[in-house]
Amino acid sequence: MLNTSEFGHELKKHGFNFYSGVPCSFLKSLINYSINECNYIAAANEGDAIAIASGASLGGKKSVVLMQNSGLTNAVSPLTSLTYPFQLPVLGFVSLRGEPGLIDEPQHELMGQITTQLLDLMQIKWQYLSSNFSEAKLQLKTANEWVEKEQPFFFVVKKNTFEKESLKLEEEAIHINKSKIEKTSFDELPSRIVTLQVINQCKDGKTVHLATTGKTGRELYEVEDSSNNLYMVGSMGCVSSLGLGLALTRKELNVVVIDGDGSLLMRMGSLSTNGTYQPENMLHILLDNQTHDSTGGQRTVSHNVNFVNIAAACGYEKSLYIHNLKELEKEIQKWKKTKGLTFLHLKIRTGSKQNLGRPQVTPHEVKIRLQQFINEKG
């Protein structure tokens, strides 16, 4: 078995000290080590963990993701449509529950058979992690080489690979909403593109815009294609988790997350993670038109959801209903001065710009120039 602390220190030597994940009994000792000794972000699900780690990678950190193999399916979307097109490398550890030949719970049987096949299908390099420390050190060297080539690498971890590592007493981070304003007037219902123009006009030299997938990213590109913008092209629902990872690692930035109702509904557990880790330099703006505009205008269920109350209950310092563009501009400018994790909910009209184009820069090019922008501000 591997001495977990020694293995963790070896990870540190290669620069891996940012972790995110979801618990698994096979990985509990490595998770405990990362909580005790490193920066560990407890994600609501495995896909969010990939996005959080990707945000840290965007900010220049070497990131580790920890998950059970049952959660690998939850992570497929960001692994194939976030880390792959943007080339945001993460080092993954996925357990092998349901290993063929071993007795395990029935829900792990099929996943145990196909775990490595899934990694192969996603074109992710992987190895079974050795329980011999000398061999594991060489494996880490190989993994690090792939990460430094902007490629993800995963270790598949069998039962009893790690020696016991006890969890030290964790401090419970309790964050209480300090300001909540619900709907008090009529909605102006501006168009998305005009709203994005207002958001764009409020930027300063430290602002990064992360725009959710679909029409939001495409219209922001139409407003202004800038080195401080990132246009999500997939991984629906992951934009605020990406923002969390970036905001926590680059605290000198103003990270503005531009979300949509369909996107947020898909991974709403991310609100609880954001509220717990509370990056004061993150502004989360929800543009809610109650439809999936990018796929033909089908209705979402956002008309039944009080996002302001939910964000407040999840620990956002400020959670505000915005009725018009004047209020939006005012609150963005106010946030830049006062900071604090803030959620702004604005309802917009349905529809989008006619003959809307698509970004003519590749996701990898977007990443490279955004990292150059970030490093100039660091």
Image (cartoon, rainbow, N blue to C red):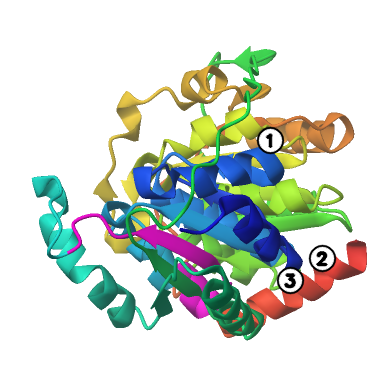
Residue at numbered disc 2 = 374
Residue at numbered disc 1 = 328
Amino acid type, residue under disc 1 in the picture: Leu
Whether residue 348 appears in this view of the structure is no
- State the image coordinates of residue 107 (x, y, percent, origin top left): 13, 48
Amino acid type, residue under disc 2 in the picture: Ile
Residue at numbered disc 3 = 370
**Pointers 3 and 2 in contact (C-beta within 8 Å):** yes
Amino acid type, residue under disc 3 in the picture: Leu
Neighbour tally class for label 1: few under 14, some 14-19, many 20 plus, Cα within 10 Å: many
Q: Quadrant of residue 328?
A: top right
Q: Residue drawn 45% across and 60% down?
A: 352
Vertical relation: 306 (above or below) 255? above
Vertical relation: 240 (above or below) 2? above
83 drawn magenta:
yes
Neighbour tally class for label 3: few under 14, some 14-19, many 20 plus, Cα within 10 Å: many
How far apart in space, not on screen, are marks 2 and 1 (Cα)? 25 Å
Q: Nearer the viewer, residue 110 or 98?
A: 98
Vertical relation: 251 (above or below) 371? above
Q: Nearer the viewer, residue 57 or 12?
A: 12
How far apart in space, not on screen, are marks 3 and 1 (Cα)? 25 Å
Q: Which residues are magenta?
A: 82-99
- State the image coordinates of residue 294 (x, y, percent, origin top left): 36, 61
Q: Is residue 99 left or right of residue 372?
A: left
- State the image coordinates of residue 243 (x, y, percent, origin top left): 63, 51
Viewport quadrant of the C terminus? bottom right
